[in-house]
Image (cartoon, coloured by chain):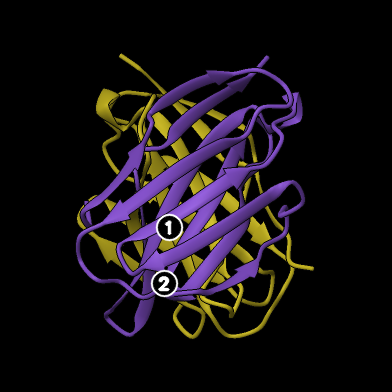
Chain colours: A yellow, B purple
Amino acid sequence: GEDVEQSLFLSVREGDSSVINCTYTDSSSTYLYWYKQEPGAGLQLLTYIFSNMDMKQDQRLTVLLNKKDKHLSLRIADTQTGDSAIYFCAKDTGRRALTFGSGTRLQVQP
Amino acid sequence: DAGITQSPRHKVTETGTPVTLRCHQTENHRYMYWYRQDPGHGLRLIHYSYGVKDTDKGEVSDGYSVSRSKTEDFLLTLESATSSQTSVYFCAISESKGGTDTQYFGPGTRLTVL
């Protein structure tokens, strides 16, 4: 089966860049997603990338995909306290469903 | 927010009782999903639906059933709740946009089984 893994916790200072990493096992062509979950809330789609791309940038967010290493990262530039949340990496299973990583809790120190 | 609501938002129940969670969407999406979220596991797919009366199992479907008699409603039933089903349950829809089928999530239902 498919497996998506993330580190559990990341702490950064306000204004620094944050890099959240994700690895996956299935190399089939598909979409990969980043979601953000704030406390007590549902998941909010941040961005996505197709597996034939290397990079996608959207304002402060940059997604990098290394297909050879099956490694996906989300970089948040100029991290703010409002970016404190849990970030989930997810991969399309091909049945229009998603497999999620366990989430990375980002803590932004003022 | 893709017009997704979930009810109830919080529920406490006792082991052995039946529980039904409701997901309602207002935008006529064909695909709907139920996930559960537990610490250390991210979100795991319970069941999904690809149309009225068309459903299929996900990776953690044991102990759950679903029904979809109308496009807008997708119900998740725990026939006899157990403490291991204490979790936060999220409903999602799938929308085709920008060449991909993107999932959007409801606000979640926190279920506690005592």
Above or below residue B13? Residue B106 is: below
Q: Residues within 10 Å of mark 2 (few under 14, many from 20)?
A: many
**Residue at (24%, 71%) from the top-left corner?**
B28
- The residue that appears at 21% across and 54% down in the rendered structure is B3
**Chain of the residue where label 1 is placed in the rendered structure:** B
Horizontal and vertical percent for residue A38? Answer: 36, 31
- Left or right for B25, reference A22: left
Q: Quadrant of residue B56?
A: bottom right
Please tell me which residue lies in front, A96 or B62.
B62
Query: Residue drawn at (47%, 76%), measured in percent from left and top?
Result: B50
Q: Horizontal placement of A30 versus B78: left or right?
A: left
Disc number placed over residue B31 in the picture, else none: 2
Hey, which quadrant is residue B99 in on the image?
A: bottom left
Question: In this rendering, would B113 be left or right of A15?
Answer: right
Q: Is residue B93 above or below residue A78?
A: below
B5 and A62: which is toward the camera: B5
* Type of the residue with mark 1: Phe
Badge 1 vs badge 2, beta-carbon distance below 8 Å: no
Give coordinates of residue B25: x percent, y percent: 27, 57
Would residue A54 be found to the left or right of residue A109 on screen? Answer: right
Question: Is label 2 in a helix, a strand or a loop?
Answer: loop
Can residue B89 be seen here? The reply is yes
Q: SS of the residue at dot 1?
A: strand
Which residue is located at x 66 percent, y 58 percent? Answer: A23
The tag earlier along the polypeptide, 1 or 2, is 2
Label 1 to label 2, Cα distance in Å? 10 Å
Residues A97 and B28: in front is: B28
Q: Mark 1 against mark 2, which lies toward the viewer?
A: 1
Q: Which residue is mark 1?
A: B74
